[in-house]
Amino acid sequence: MAQCADVVVVGGGLIGMLTARELALAGASVRLLERGRTGRESSWAGGGIVSPLYPWRYADAVTALARWGQLHYPALAERLAAESGIDPEFTRSGLLILDLEERARALAWAAGHEARLEEVAGRALRDVEPRLAEGFERGLWLPEVGQLRNPRLLKALRHTLAPCGVRVEEDCEVTGLVVRGERVVGVEGAAGRVDAERVVVAGGAWSAGLLEGFGGEVKVRPARGQMILFKTVPGHLQRMVMREGRYLIPRRDGRVLAGSTLEYVGFDKSTTEQALAELSAAAHALLPSLGQFAVEHHWAGLRPASRSGIPFIGEHPAVGGLYLNTGHFRNGVVLGAASARLAADLVLGREPILDPAPYALGAERGEVEF
Ligand SMILES: Cc1cc2nc3c(=O)[nH]c(=O)nc-3n(C[C@H](O)[C@H](O)[C@H](O)COP(=O)(O)OP(=O)(O)OC[C@H]3O[C@@H](n4cnc5c(N)ncnc54)[C@H](O)[C@@H]3O)c2cc1C
């Protein structure tokens, strides 16, 4: 016999878990079905920067979600820590960008979006990050940018789901949507048939496969990102630092992440020697003292790439009750909190936190590649 839920969420990455939590907190009966283990794919692999890398390059639709997330993450991280006993370590370490070519555009963007962005030079640059390599004279400093430690955020979030009332089922792949007439009535897969009034697809890079054949092309594809980790000592690097898309993120325990590649190689999650060499070289060029420390770990994840990085959030135009929350590309952490809230608003028919139009399946997204 089919089992029933108000809402089934497909995919237990950050986006699926945040969405399930929002729905359950509003009183919905929610089942979250995850093919493997929750929080082990792109969300685990990410750097946790609570900002798009070059925020001025993005459409307002992305900025609006990011802004909401930046305002709400400190409290959310605190709540998750209190509920789970696991601290996601939200830290406002700031982001120092050493690319100056887009200086004017960056300053104009900051002025128009109430974002703190200062140009720093000489001594002031060294005060921001004392161990920065010689040769850098100027930088763009965003002191308010924070970061979260992804594995901790995911573990904390996972712990809070059952107490909120979410039924989480792992090793539970969804193989198809069950549609009757023009409405979704459930899903089928490893858990058998699960009836639901509404289904939210939050399957990250794998989302498009599930939505094939229902019209309205969901342009989400995998974009591999590789990252390496150095084990240094606490305080060795103090700020997030970036140049030409390569960045360093200092964790509280002294570990330093160096990321990341952007590769279109299908669903291949393997790591490569070439990426290890490139990421190491870029890291040493920013912070030569990293040469004293070993690379402790090297991994890859598949980002859910979408055109212009604008996620798909909202009801499918051709299938009633079927919702999407996917395609967050390079920014699933910073966009995730707002995107989950907005998706829950739309599923529950609440007043949405933001205008949902730019995230609709048929909305114009442009062609910007990141
Ligand atoms: C190297 C790297 C660095 C990054 N850095 C940052 C950063 O600093 N800041 C930031 O904001 N973002 C960053 N990101 C992007 C961010 O991690 C992603 O946008 C985000 O994790 C996407 O979350 P998700 O839940 O959609 O996908 P995922 O975490 O991939 O989760 C999708 C889940 O759905 C499950 N699933 C798929 N299909 C099915 C099915 N049929 N049935 C059941 N389950 C299914 C999968 O198993 C998976 O667990 C980075 C990503 C990478 C790879």
Image: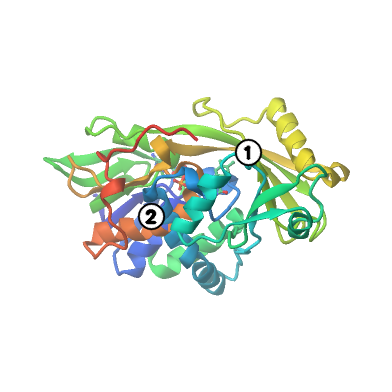
Q: Position of residue 222 (x, y in %)?
A: 47, 33
Q: Earlier in the sequence, mark 2 or mark 1?
A: 1
Confirm if mark 1 falls within 8 A of ligand 1: yes
Is residue 194 depicted above or below 157 in this figure? Answer: above
Mark 2 belongs to which amino acid? Ser
Instruction: Check disc 2: other Cα within 10 Å, few if <14, some if 14-19, many if 20+.
Output: many
Q: How many marks?
A: 2
> Can you give x and y, in whole percent of width and height, for residue 123 in the image?
79, 57
Left or right side of 139 for 182:
left
Element type at mark 2: helix
**Residue visible at 29% across and 65% down in the picture:** 28
Quarter holding residue 203: top left
Judged from the image, the secondary structure of the residue bearing numbered disc 1 is loop
Q: Residue at x 38, y 41 (%)?
A: 190
In the rendered view, would you say 330 is above or below 220?
A: below
Q: Quadrant of residue 78?
A: bottom right
Q: Which mark is residue 260?
A: 1
Residue 36 appearing in the image: no
Viewer-nearest residue: 239 or 193: 239
Which residue is drawn at the image coordinates 19% and 42% (left, top)? 317
Q: Residue at x 54, y 67 (%)?
A: 77
Q: Label 2 belongs to which residue?
A: 339
Residue 164, percent from left and from top: 41, 69
The yes-or-no answer for disc 2 within 8 Å of ligand 1 is no
Point out the residue furthest to the right here. 292
Residue closer to the observer: 28 or 138: 138
Q: Position of residue 209 (x, y in %)?
A: 35, 32
